Amino acid sequence: MTMRRVAILGSTGSIGTTALRVLSRQRERFCVSALTAFSNAALLREQEVEFRPAFVGLVNNGASEHAAWESGRSCLIAAATRDDVDIVLNAVVGAAGLDATLAALECGKRVALANKETLVMAGHLVHAARARGGGELVPVDSEHSAILQCITGRTGVEVRRVILTASGGPFRQWSSEKIERATLTDALQHPTWRMGRKITVDSATLANKALEVIEAHHLFGLSFDQIDVVVHPQSVIHSFVEFVDGSVLAQLGVPSMELPVLYALTHPERVPDTGVPPFDPVESSPMTFERVRVADFPALALGVAAGRRGGAAPAVFNAANEEAVSLFIDGRIRFGDIPGAIESALEALGEWNGDSRDAILAADEAARRHVRTRFQC
Ligand code: NAD
Ligand code: MG
């Protein structure tokens, strides 16, 4: 494998720091050309000293929110489209990562995509950018990495169905009344994964699994009827693929994002790495499975329905969820208010057109406004 040059968007976050840990062990195969972060200048500076990238971008330099969004956008695009970059790891959280994904694909780069929100809100634009620019889209999300690993290297493979595993989050066994009143501290107690706050709250509502169903639809060209979800509390099996002859493959491993990040960089090859602890089936026992409590976690069904509806509905789902989660994190709404906020935005705006980038961004903004207005913020 020749030396590949990597840009990391969101290098100070959970996925960004995991990626740099992986890259520090892979210096003969990869170098870091660009790093960007929204805040945490001190950590970014440490990363700069260690990895010596040619480009370093700090987005939030105290400017107003709008100015930060604009400068953030240009900073991410500048990093994602550099000539000295082969692979863009998009580890930004939320819709803010959209233009960088599109720009990198237009330039023919490989995008290792952790930033699932952008594929959910604008899947058809992402595909069009890839087709135009000849770029490549490889998932970082552990479930989608598992599916990719199960189908890679097989020609003429016919997939009948995929089954995404879900840990069930911290409220898997809570009563619906108790879930309604859950605090931020409760929601941040994820049983198996250590991640950024937004995705951790999404894992507690199961909105994350809805985003992942839509993500699988776009990545693997599957209809929504071909994508199921099962609760697997131990997070050892990262997903299943069922083939047309009835055979089922799965990918297993201890819950760590290091392997999916590394695989997104090396796919379809595998390279030696010492980061992931050895797998011991006995230590990983028992592995159990449960049906999703669909009625008690309504964000999942709302998101899948938005995915089926298409148009701007997935962007509305995503933006309403982002806004509601941010209000919940700020202590302004209750955990139990999140699904209602999403549902209300989808009722009001779900029919909007999502044909172009501008239409999607208009729906995104309208959904955020709708949620804020509903709670008078
Ligand atoms: P995080 O909050 O820990 O990190 C986000 C990073 O993006 C930070 O570096 C932050 O500075 C930067 N950022 C935030 N807002 C920005 C903006 N407006 N403009 C530019 N940069 C911005 O989040 P995370 O947990 O690392 O998740 C990142 C993405 O990866 C999310 O889309 C998440 O759904 C996905 N993901 C994460 C995990 C995980 O284990 N953490 C697993 C699967 C998928
Ligand atoms: Mg996942």
Image: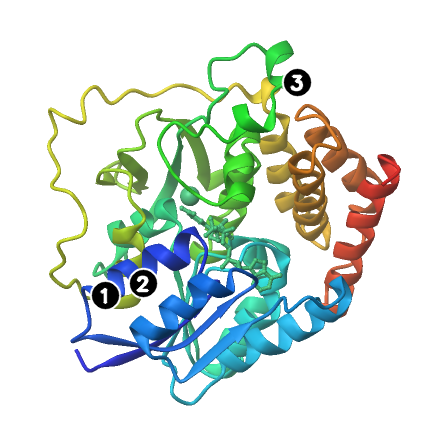
Q: Earlier in the sequence, mark 3 or mark 2?
A: 2
**Mark 3 residue crowding within 10 angstroms, few (<14) / some (14–19) / many (20+):** some
Label 2: how many Cα within 10 Å (few below 14, some 14–19, many 20+): many
Image quarter of the N terminus: bottom left
Q: Is residue 209 left or right of residue 341?
A: left
* Residue 90 vertical position relative to residue 339 in the rendered view, above or below: below
Mark closer to the chain start, 1 or 3 = 1
Residue at label 1? 24
Instruction: Name which residue lies at 27% across and 35% down.
Output: 237
Few, some or many residues within 10 Å of mark 1 (<14, 14–19, 20+): some
Which residue occupies the foreground of this view, 280 or 287?
Answer: 280
In this rendering, the answer to whether 5 lies above or below 363 is below
Q: Quadrant of residue 303 in the image? A: top right
Residue pointed to by mark 2:
20
Q: Position of residue 198 (x, y in %)?
A: 56, 43
Q: Spatial distance from mark 1 to mark 3, Cα to Cα?
A: 43 Å
* Image marks 3 and 2: residues in contact by CB distance under 8 Å: no
Amino acid bearing label 2 = Leu
Looking at the image, what colour scheme do you see?
rainbow
Q: Are marks 2 and 1 in contact (CB under 8 Å)?
A: yes
Lateral position of residue 239 relative to residue 337, left or right: left
> Which element is circle 1 on?
helix
Q: Position of residue 313 (x, y in %)?
A: 71, 48
Instruction: Using the numbered discs, state the Cα–Cα distance from disc 3 to disc 2 in whole angstroms.
Output: 37 Å
Count the marks: 3
Q: Which residue is mark 3?
A: 180
